[in-house]
Amino acid sequence: MLHEADDFLAECDALAEVLARLSPADWARPTLFKEWTANDVMVHLHYWNEAADLSLTDDAAFVTFYEEMAADVKAKGRRAAENARVTARGPELLALWRDYARNMAARWRTLDPKKRVKWAGPDMSVRSSMTARQMETWAHGLAVFDLLGVARAETDRLRNIVVLGVNTYPWTFKVRGLTPPDPMPRLTLTAPSGALWSFGPEDAGATINGSALDFCYVVTQTRNHGDTALRIDGPAAEQWMTQAQCFAGPPETPPAKGARRCAGVP
């Protein structure tokens, strides 16, 4: 049983509830994420949900798909390339994405969590792939919550994203051609429930302390670490939090301090 599929579905349901409030004008309003609209966000999420399904069933077809998509992105830009492939918009797009996500969660729930699948970066397990779908939904969905000035009700399913952030500690550096500092900093994070989650060696010279939510903001690049209450001590911790990236693809630059925020919040 892959419980991450249930967490993915819960994340989708939380986002769908907010999306249902959007007016036609809201769907076309730019968010603070690279000026993507809600339509752009949902095209992206649906498109890559379909890609994850393809990686599960046909390795060769996924490699071909990714090579063709990469060429399109280079020629047209990501938004234009994805929007050309998913043409639904507004409520029609919401229904398409929601129904597909529900069916996807039901199918993935019974898979072997250790099965390996292709992806845009290194191959990963089915468990990591489904966690990545939850992470993408949570991270890109935040742009919509921010647009409407709505604070999301967080739960301990954030732990999946925390674990993904921890597991991609080496990736953050390697994707930039750097050697990951060893050992990884010690993390002590407070969950939404109040539980304490710890990762990394207890005797690590560098430490990161604070809320699991703030850590997730930073590793998904939805907030600058300077806009969080994380306590970051030591060069390795500072270097990690300055460029953390828990998602695949080329190296991305985190948002500048103050660039991402919830509407109505100074």
Image (cartoon, rainbow, N blue to C red):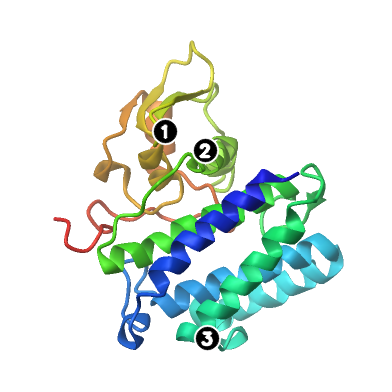
Crowd rating for badge 3 (residues with CA inside 10 Å; few <14, some 14–19, many 20+): few
Q: Nearer the viewer, residue 195 or 247?
A: 195
Left or right position of 186 against 118: left
Determine the CA span between mark 1 and mark 3: 35 Å
Name which residue lies at 70% across and 67% down. Answer: 103
Question: Mark 2 highlights which residue?
Answer: 159
Disc 2 versus disc 1: distance between alpha carbons? 8 Å
What whole-number distance in Å separates the C-alpha atoms at marks 2 and 3?
Answer: 32 Å
- Contact? badges 2 and 1 (CB < 8 Å): yes
Neighbours of disc 1 within 10 Å: few (<14), some (14-19), many (20+): many
Of residues 249 and 186, the one nearer the viewer is 186
Residue 228, located in which quarter of the rendered image? Answer: top left
Residue at (38, 77) in percent of width and height: 37
Q: Earlier in the sequence, mark 2 or mark 1?
A: 2
**Residue 133 in view in this figure:** yes
Front position in the image: 113 or 166:
113
Q: Type of residue at label 1? A: Ala
Element type where label 1 sits in the image = loop
* Residue hosting label 3: 92
Going from N to C along the chain, the mark reached first, 1 or 3, is 3
Q: Residue at x 59, y 42 (%)?
A: 171
Amino acid type at circle 3 is Glu
Q: Position of residue 64 (x, y in %)?
A: 79, 73
Which residue was labeled with disc 1?
A: 191
Q: Amino acid at mark 2?
A: Arg
